[in-house]
Amino acid sequence: MTDRTALIRPVPDSFPLALVRHGRPDIDLGLARAQHREYRRVLEETAHVVHVVPTDEAHPDCVFIEDTAVIVGTVAIIARIGAESRRGETPPVAEYLSRRFDIVEMRPPGTLDGGDVFLLDDVFYVGRSSRTNDDGIGQLRAIAHHQGFPVVTVDVEDALHLKSAVLPIDDETVVVTPRSVDESKLEGLRVLYEHDDERNRFSALPLDERTVLVTADAPVTAASVAAMGHAIVPLDVSEIQAADGGLTCMSIMLR
Ligand code: GLY
């Protein structure tokens, strides 16, 4: 059986102060916590061993644990998160990952958020975004090449992270928010598009070879995923989305 471990980090009381690109949303803390508990329950029900990193009140965004590290083969790259106020999120994650991986701490002036990186069919795709810069991409590229993985850089034009707008759902397919990234870099992948009426609402996290966790408020886009033969599990994460988060953001998957 595949070893599936998911690292998660509970929602802190300070979560309503999480960084957002636009305005200041009214976040319901109790509902955010309930949605996060449901996320954890789904992971456990799909045979993930869930490891909980303690939450951190000093870091409202710490629930978005994905941004803190990227696993590249036998190496865990500890990110230098693009938002300076979030950089203190990494030490407890690095401590846990050091039990299983060689640790490489990203050096300045590099910046990189894990939300800008995904691995699909043994190729790393990395977003050049407001959070991830060329130096950070260069450091990732050096490690990935050493571990035998090619790296494709994708310009993120209108999204927080690459995975805000390009969601892998299996080994050859991504769901893309139109007009958000340089799609020419996705050549060779099968692309489904987020429905225009659901713009920026679809997010997805593959749970196993067949099952995909999807956001509940993008049913038309989710139906196109289901039409490909995937079993979909809808989850309401409205309060997480209000803080510019999605389904991948809340975990680091170790597989
Ligand atoms: N709230 C997610 C982020 O800005 O990093």
Image (cartoon, rainbow, N blue to C red):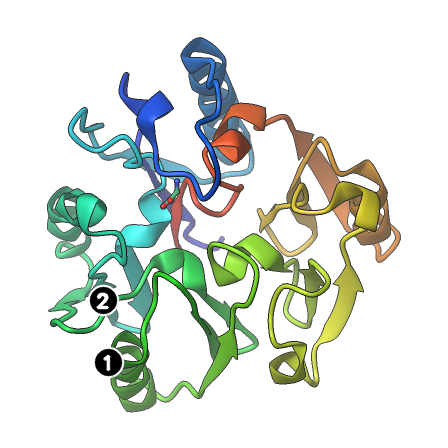
Q: Position of residue 218 (x, y in %)?
A: 75, 38
Q: Secondary structure at mark 2?
A: strand
Q: Is residue 255 visible?
A: no
Check disc 1 and give the amino acid type: Gln
Q: Is residue 239 visible?
A: yes
Query: As drawn, which residue projects farthest toward the front?
Result: 23
Q: Position of residue 237 (x, y in %)?
A: 57, 28
Query: Which is closer to the viewer, label 2 or label 1?
Result: 1
Q: Which residue is denoted by mark 1 in the rendering?
A: 139
State the mark number for residue 195. Answer: none
Q: Quadrant of residue 189?
A: bottom right
Q: Say whether marks 2 and 1 touch (CB < 8 Å).
A: yes
Taking depth in this image into account, of 29 and 120 the one nearest to the observer is: 29
Q: At 27% from the left edge and 58% from the top edge, which residue is drawn?
A: 82
Q: At 36% from the left edge and 49% from the top edge, which residue is drawn?
A: 66
Q: Quadrant of the C terminus?
A: bottom left
Say whether residue 242 is left or right of residue 105.
right
Q: Position of residue 10 (x, y in %)?
A: 32, 26
Q: Position of residue 202 (x, y in %)?
A: 68, 45
Say whether residue 16 is left or right of residue 231.
left
61 above or below 255?
above
111 above or below 2?
below
Query: As drawn, which residue projects farthest toward the top?
Result: 30
N-term-proximal mark, 2 vs 1: 2
- Other-residue count near label 2 (Cα within 10 Å), few / some / many at <14 / 14–19 / ≥20: many
Q: Which residue is denoted by mark 2 in the rendering?
A: 77
94 above or below 176?
above
Q: Secondary structure at mark 1?
A: helix
Q: Give the spatial CA distance, label 2 vs label 1.
A: 9 Å
Check disc 2 and give the amino acid type: Ile
